[in-house]
Structure formats: C-alpha cells, structure tokens
Image (tube, grey):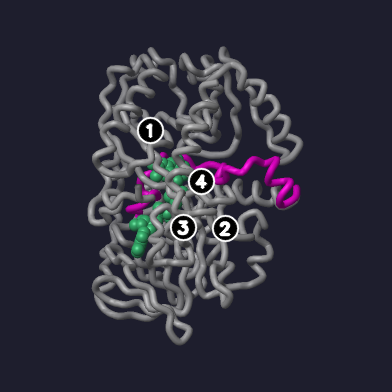
Amino acid sequence: MPLVHPDALHFETAVESYWEASADPLGLALSPLHRDETCDVAVIGGGFTGLSAALELAERGVDVRLLEAGHIGWGASGRNGGFACIGSHKMSYGTMIRRYGLEATRAFYGAMKESVALVADNAARHAIDVWKTMQGEITLAHRPDRLDEFREDQRFYRETFGEENELLSRAELVERGLAGPEFHGGLLGPVGFGVHPLNYVRGLARAAHKAGAKLHPRSRLIRWEERDGHHRLATAEATLTARRVIVATNGYTPEDVSPRHAGRLLPALSNIIVTRPLSEDEIRAQNWTSEVLAYDSRNLLHYFRLLPGRRFLFGGRGGTDSSDAAAPAYRAFMTDTFRRMFPAWADAEITHFWRGFVCLAHDLVPYVGALDDRASVWTALCYHGNGVAMGSWSGRAVARMLLDEKAGQAMPAVITRRLARYPLPLFRPLYLKGAYLWFNWQDNH
Ligand SMILES: Cc1cc2nc3c(=O)[nH]c(=O)nc-3n(C[C@H](O)[C@H](O)[C@H](O)COP(=O)(O)OP(=O)(O)OC[C@H]3O[C@@H](n4cnc5c(N)ncnc54)[C@H](O)[C@@H]3O)c2cc1C
C-alpha cells in the first residue's frame, strides 16, 4: 500500500469541506508560475508554514516566491479542525525531559504557548476574520480511571510549566454544558481557541502578498535540480531558480522530488464530519452548549467543537487507506462514533465529510531547520496533527533561522536537533497499522 494514495493528491480540486463552503474569498488575483523566474528564497507549500515563512521573509525585504500545487490552503491548513492549541508532539514529556533536559522541554512548551498567541496576533495584525472562539481546551475522560491520570497531569503541568489546569468532575462538566454519556470528567487548560482555518490561511496569504511575497498557486514542483550553487525548481510550465529553498509541504511532501525528506516522514489521515446547524432544543437536549475545544482521552482520540453558527464538528485520526474508495466506510464509522458519543444528535444530518494528511516524525517531535551542510535547503514540519499554531510559529522560525544563524541557537533544542530517518522506511504503512491496532487495544482495556 502506498503511503499516500494518488486519489489524495487531486491538487486541482478543492476538498468538499465545511470550511470551503463558508470561507471568505481570497480576494487576490494570483497566477501560476507561467515563465522562468529567479528569486533569493523559494518556498514550497502554501499552508500555514509556507505562508508564515514567506510573510516573515517578505517583511524583512527578502525576494521570496512561493509555489503551491493546489490553491492557497489546499493541504491540511485549509481543511483542519481549527483548533489553535498546544500539543504538536507525540513524545511524552517524561521522555522529552530525559532526552533533551528540563530547560529545553520548558523552552519547547513556551514555544507552543507562544504559537497560539501568534495566531491571535496574526489575526489582529492582518485583520483576518478567523471566527475566534472562547479560550481554553479540555480533555475528557473516556473512562473513569483516566481521572487519576488527569490528577497526575494537573500536578505535572503546575510543577513543570507553572500552568494551572482545572480538574472537572462529571457533574461540573454538566454544569458547564459539556455533557455526554462517555465523559466522566475533564482537565481544562487555559491555552487555545477555535478558528476558521481557511479564512486564517487566506488571511496569511493576503498579508504575505501585501508584504511583497510572490505567491503562485497551481504550481506543483515536479523536478528539483541543483547546479552552480542554485536550486532549479521546475513546474509543468516553468522553472524557478533560487539561492535557498524552504520546503513546507508537511504531510503532502513529495519524497521523490525532495530526496532529503525521503524515509523521514509518516503522513497519517485525519477525518472530519460536520452536522447541519443544530436547533437550540437539540443543543439543550444533549446539554453541550460550550464552544470550548474538546478531545477525549483515547490514544486514537476524537476532537470536537461546537462551531459558531451551531454546527458541530467531530474529527478523528485513523484509517490507513487514502483512496476515494475507502472514504465512505470511514464516513460511516465516524458518523456511528459521533452518534454514540452524542446520542441526542443522532438524527442530525451530516452535511460534510473530508479527510487530509497530518505528518508524524520518527522522533515524535516537530523539526525546524536546515537539511544540507551549506544551509541552502530548509524545512519545518511534523506537527503530529497539531499545526494550526505550531505551523504558523515554525514557518516564521525557519525564516528567521535562514536569515540569521544566531536565531537557530535561540530555538528550543527539542525541535532543531534532527529529522531522523525511519528504520526500514518501506514498512512505514505497517508501522501505522500496527500503532493503530495497539492504540485501539489500549483504549479499550
Ligand atoms: C483533517 C485534519 C484535521 C486537523 N485538525 C487540526 C486542528 O484542529 N488543529 C491543529 O493544530 N492542527 C490540525 N491539523 C493539522 C494541521 O492542519 C497541519 O499540521 C498544518 O495545517 C500543517 O500546515 P503546513 O503548512 O505545514 O502543511 P499543509 O497545510 O499540509 O500544506 C502543505 C502544502 O504543500 C503543497 N504541496 C505538496 N506538494 C507540493 C509540490 N510538489 N509543489 C508545490 N506544493 C506542494 C500542498 O498542496 C499543501 O497545500 C489537522 C489536519 C487534518 C488533515
């Protein structure tokens, strides 16, 4: 089975998401790369990471062009759950502290918090209508025994990061309009808010364009040659020659075109359903009235939020077959799970279903840094399904590192050390299947 099925790479078509249906227009007349051009820095990928990098470079007066295979935000950035929050790693904090030390772990946590603030700042600074919702995110215990772990986590966050999380009993969840038969209590953190991701990514594109970055949608990089210290980046129509390149393609990275990434990334599917607008009676019947960002405590977690406009968004990681033929079964599975967890809404029609790729790293932390000895190829990626905020931050960070060696030294070591190769990369689809089986077993025992 291929890591990514060709069906999942129809760059010419927009995914049928609720975000595509409700977004503000981009409002820019951008054209593909029609003729050969040169620039100082080329950015590949027009999502949060690539656009944040392009914005930062353009604001500092760098001659930057960006190639995007689809339309702006075609990838995960335009189709995610809109959770601007922390958690872009799968490595446990215990392992992180052992491997990188306490200070580096704290610095990484600080960067994640800063990344959430950056999203709010971007929205304000560039006047982007991101549909910002209330502050905070909650993990909901899907089994009563998870509450003991929550108590431990609460203590850990307080002692390690000075972060106060609130432990809520089942009764307190009900009081706050967060009720469900599978929710036995919750841990509410203060950081995070919801956004309309496509509005946000389009707003970043407008800001980057205004600052002077040249953005080329429908310009898929198909061949990459290096000659005389320059990078020649070919699309079907023309070639962009650049002194330096930032690859910001995350779960859609073409390993055949960018061999420095080969064997180092594991794209994984995430799936979302959205309901029609719920009536006030329906919302009362379920007693889920809060717009706070919510997850359950499974390893294969579900994420969900009540959207402005009263639709409900319900997402989950899982499935390893990204062909179109496999999609209906996953839609049915997601719908059944949603109805089990929110029984009062069992009759609410599902109006949208879509999927997309997140990106995992072998080390289970993001990577931001150079990929070659002469520091001419850079990348920022692997947010482990959590890149609304961290992609924005990492795009800006990689641009700063490219421009100034000292900026790299100030970045948290957790994310700048290496982008390791998977052992036996051909077996990556099997790793994922194995991990899902193991997580599923753990979640149910
Ligand atoms: C269904 C789903 C739900 C998610 N929910 C959340 C959430 O709620 N909160 C959160 O924080 N994160 C979430 N994520 C993850 C988050 O969306 C990503 O981490 C983030 O968008 C990554 O941004 P990016 O710019 O690095 O990559 P992407 O947005 O994936 O952009 C990469 C771009 O590269 C382009 N590209 C690929 N190949 C080429 C090529 N050869 N030439 C030119 N361009 C190319 C693609 O077209 C794509 O647009 C979710 C992801 C998915 C799929």
Camera-near label (4 vs 3) is 4
Q: Is residue 297 left or right of residue 407?
A: left
Earlier in the chain: of badge 3 and badge 2, it is 3
> Within 8 Å: ligand 1 and the Cβ of disc 3?
yes
Q: CA distance from mark 4 to mark 2?
A: 15 Å
Q: Nearer the viewer, residue 256 or 148?
A: 256
Residue 437, x across and y down, in percent: 47, 32
Cβ of mark 1 under 8 Å from ligand 1: the answer is no
Q: Is residue 374 above or below residue 175?
A: below
- Expressed as whole percent of the image width and height from the top left, the position of residue 420 reads 57, 58
The foreground one among 222 and 348 is 222
Query: Which residue, given by chain and number where applicable, does mark 2 sit on?
Result: 420
Tell me the element at label 4: loop
Q: Is mark 4 within 8 Å of ligand 1?
A: yes
Q: Quick one: 128 or 67, which is closer to the camera?
A: 67
Q: Is residue 65 visible?
A: yes
Residue 33 image offset from top left, x and y in percent: 28, 72
**From mark 3 to mark 2, how far is it between C-alphas?**
20 Å
Mark 3 highlights which residue?
Answer: 49
Q: Is residue 132 visible?
A: no
Q: Residues within 10 Å of mark 4 (few under 14, many from 20)?
A: many
CA distance separating discs 4 and 3? 14 Å
Q: Secondary structure at mark 2?
A: loop
Q: Please count the marks in the image.
A: 4
Kind of residue at badge 4: His
Residue marked by disc 1: 308
Residue type at mark 2: give it.
Ala
Q: Amino acid at mark 3?
A: Thr
